[in-house]
Amino acid sequence: MKKFYFTLICCFSLCAINAQVIISQNGIFPTTKQLVTGEKSNPIVKKTTKAPTMENVTYSESFEGYQEGEEEWLPEGWDKQTVIDEDYGQGLTSISSWHASTGLDFMGIFPTDGEVMQWINFGYLESDEGYVFYEQDEWLISSSFTPQSGDKMYFDLYFAPLFMYLAGMSDEGDFLFDFENPTFKVRVYATTDDGKSWKKIWDANDLVDRYDDITIWDYLGDWETFEVALNEYAGEMVKIAFRYSGKDGDSIGLDNIVVGKEDTSSITSQNVSSQAGVNRKSGSFELIYPSGMNTVSVYSLSGKLMDQFSLPAGGQFTIPFTNYPKGVYIFKFQGSGTISIKSIN
């Protein structure tokens, strides 16, 4: 199972978590496989894109109104559906269906708008024989709204394409990817008949052409804003469903859903992932980082501290990796905030 190839280090020393650990900030806490960025004290929410400024907003939802301890809470008019895998004789646990979350403190994953997001975990239970992984099919369904001509829907999605396509390891210890058979799927649907029929309007797997065995390492888990044109539904009452399905997949997050028209006078786009980065060059790691960062620690995936360096002003630093064995390393930048980035040697 790929989780055992990608067992991450303890969250108490890094912003990472073992893929098999279940913890809870609000009584029940999401599990996840991926290393992410930031800390609650000074969170750094990485987003590779940003929704444009809206001229007219037709509909929006950022899941505010949640009360602590009420993970099953949904905004008024919203619903969720869980498809049960009959082979296991029971449904998934609540953390493996859509639920409200104020963030994952120990991993630095926080809502992109307001204080609450929706989150879902890959489903598994422990048994005497080991881990049992569930086939999941989870739907989060919006309240009704009526798109106007020219409206688009924007939504923030946290997911890790690397784990979507990770298939295992070779006998030589190399990671194997299968870009034709994702382990989990994230899709968006629309209905005009209150759920009697659904039409797919967006699919994360349609982005597969941007990945290969090398570039996939740039997609270890991040927030990204996506858009869907809703012209087809202008003037009609619709509901939107966000569907997660798969087996032995990965955790994902959803936030900041906005439907409306772009303000063409002030369309913006930004890449805040450029706050910090680790580029693998011939014989070295080239580090870039924002002002305020003053140290970087290098850890192996097992949690062993490999090196620690003071960072000069200027935002650039080079670390030779001639003494590092082949593997995956975590670079933890610290100063005015914390950023953790994974890279491969």
Image (cartoon, helix red, strand yellow):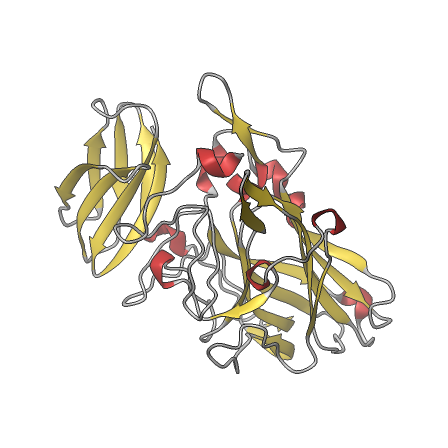
Where residue 138 sits: x, y (%)?
68, 59
Where residue 24 sits: x, y (%)?
43, 64
Reply above or below: 340 against 198: above
Q: Is residue 35 left or right of residue 170?
A: left
Toward the viewer: 8 or 125?
125
Reply above or below: 214 against 124: above
Where residue 294 sits: x, y (%)?
15, 52
Among all residues in the image, which is located at the extreme front? 128
Reply above or below: 201 against 219: below
Toward the viewer: 146 or 332?
332
Q: Quadrant of residue 254?
A: bottom right
Can you say which quadrant of the picture contains the N terminus?
Answer: top right
Q: Residue at x 65, y 72 (%)?
A: 259
Q: Residue at x 53, y 53 (%)?
A: 251
Q: Quadrant of residue 165?
A: top right
Toward the viewer: 252 or 58?
252
Q: How many marks?
A: 0
Instruction: Work out whether residue 157 can be spotted.
Output: no
Can you say which quadrant of the picture contains the C terminus?
Answer: top left
Instruction: Work out whether residue 224 can be spotted.
Output: yes
Where residue 151 sits: x, y (%)?
70, 70
Q: Is residue 98 left or right of residue 21?
A: right
Q: Quadrant of residue 27?
A: bottom left
Q: Residue at x 25, y 54 (%)?
A: 290
Q: Is residue 44 left or right of residue 333?
A: right
Q: Residue at x 48, y 76 (%)?
A: 69
Toward the viewer: 294 or 91?
91
